[in-house]
Image (cartoon, helix red, strand yellow):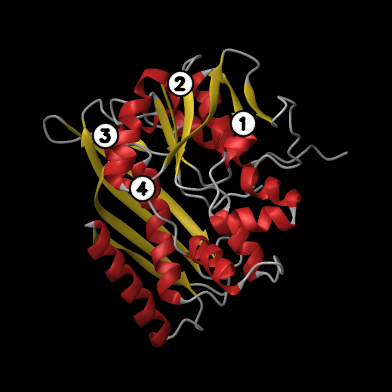
Amino acid sequence: MAAPKLDEFERIARFFAPLAAPEALGLLDDVALIEGPPGRQYVLKTDAIVEGVHFLPEDPADQVAQKLLRVNLSDLAGKSATPLGYLLTTALPRTCDEAWLERFAAGLARDQAEFGIALLGGDTVATPGPVTLSVAAIGTVRAGAAVLRSGAAPGDDVFVSGSLGDGALGLKALQGGLPALSETERAHLVDRYRLPRPRLALGQRLSGFASAMMDISDGLVADLGHLCSASGVGAEVEAARLPLSAAAAAALGAAPELMSAVLAGGDDYELLFTAQPIAAPALARLAAETGVAVTRIGSIVREPLGVQVLDGRGHRITIPVGGYRHF
């Protein structure tokens, strides 16, 4: 019998973690921290997106470019960092002609202007396979102010920014699902799938309030599980507290089984963080000042380790798949 294949995180732990420098944080925090000018640190992050995996072949090239940049900026937001610049690698088939590239570059230009970031270099190659794109983003943060995954403690509250489930439901809409929704509701969800909202302003101001933080890319349950693992704690999430957009609420109203997509579907790119209960008034002020909702969804517990999702009666909800994994 063949040995079971290693999953994404087992591969990283076995083959790459032994190669990592101390600044890589054990490859457990999705970024590296390197000393910069006096009083500052550089935050380094890279993410790739692949046609057919992270975006659809028919997605507009400018929005593909914006998603590529924004998923990396979201990780910088999860460390309270300010964007500085980025490196771009493109592996493109010959079907990506000059018109495609022009639109792709236009999407990058729009987001460079919006988020105050500029291209620093990169590489471009041809491939017979699907479009494969990678950005290495560089940010800065005050020395010691980056919020890592490892600081959560029993008694902390668990918070998320914005709303959950829109990205995963948007993909379902693009794939022909969610027939009960109006065109306006479907358009909202598709927009959230194609164009994540990196919460940079909120993330930068959460340093000093958040005890642990990351962004949600692989799904709430999976990513909260990563945070709990790094902190050596468990978490209880109250499903009734999950913040939903009007479109997501309509989708769940028509098909309650879609709750699994909200909990584990991924593509949220919202901030997930923990803080002591005493921080709640300050967090409410930050939410009002940045225009980004902040919602308490649960609490950190000493045990059991891992993540439990509870219904309104306190009973555990079983999630068939905890989150997205590449392997």
Give the SS element for disc 4: loop
Tell me where residue 147 appears, x and y as whole percent.
Answer: 35, 29
Task: Kindly give the residue lying farthest to the right in the view shown.
Answer: 1
Give the quarter of the image for residue 167.
bottom right
Label 4 Cα crowd, 10 Å radius (few <14 / some 14-19 / many 20+):
many
Residue at which label 3 appears:
34
> Residue sitting at 62 percent across and 71 percent down?
182
Give the SS element for disc 3: strand
Q: Is residue 206 visible?
A: yes
Give the quarter of the image for residue 229.
top right
Instruction: Give the spatial CA distance, label 3 vs label 1.
Output: 37 Å
Tell me where residue 82 appears, x and y as whole percent.
Answer: 24, 45
Say which amino acid is labelled 2: Ala
Residue at which label 2 appears:
152
Say which amino acid is labelled 4: Arg
The reply to whether discs 2 and 3 touch (Cβ–Cβ < 8 Å) is no
Q: Which one is closest to the eye, mark 3 or mark 1?
A: 1
Instruction: Give the spatial CA distance, label 4 vs label 3.
Output: 22 Å
Give the quarter of the image for residue 5.
top right
Instruction: Give the spatial CA distance, label 1 vs label 4.
Output: 23 Å
Give the SS element for disc 1: strand
Question: In the image, 175: left or right of 213?
Answer: right
Task: Specify the label residue 132 is tagged with.
Answer: none
Label 2 Cα crowd, 10 Å radius (few <14 / some 14-19 / many 20+):
many
Tell me where residue 174 appears, x and y as whole percent.
Answer: 62, 70
Say which amino acid is labelled 3: Ile
> Residue sitting at 26 percent across and 28 percent down?
145
Instruction: Give the spatial CA distance, label 2 vs label 3.
Output: 23 Å
Task: Specify the label residue 199 is tagged with.
Answer: 4
Residue at which label 1 appears:
238
Question: In the image, 270: left or right of 205?
Answer: right
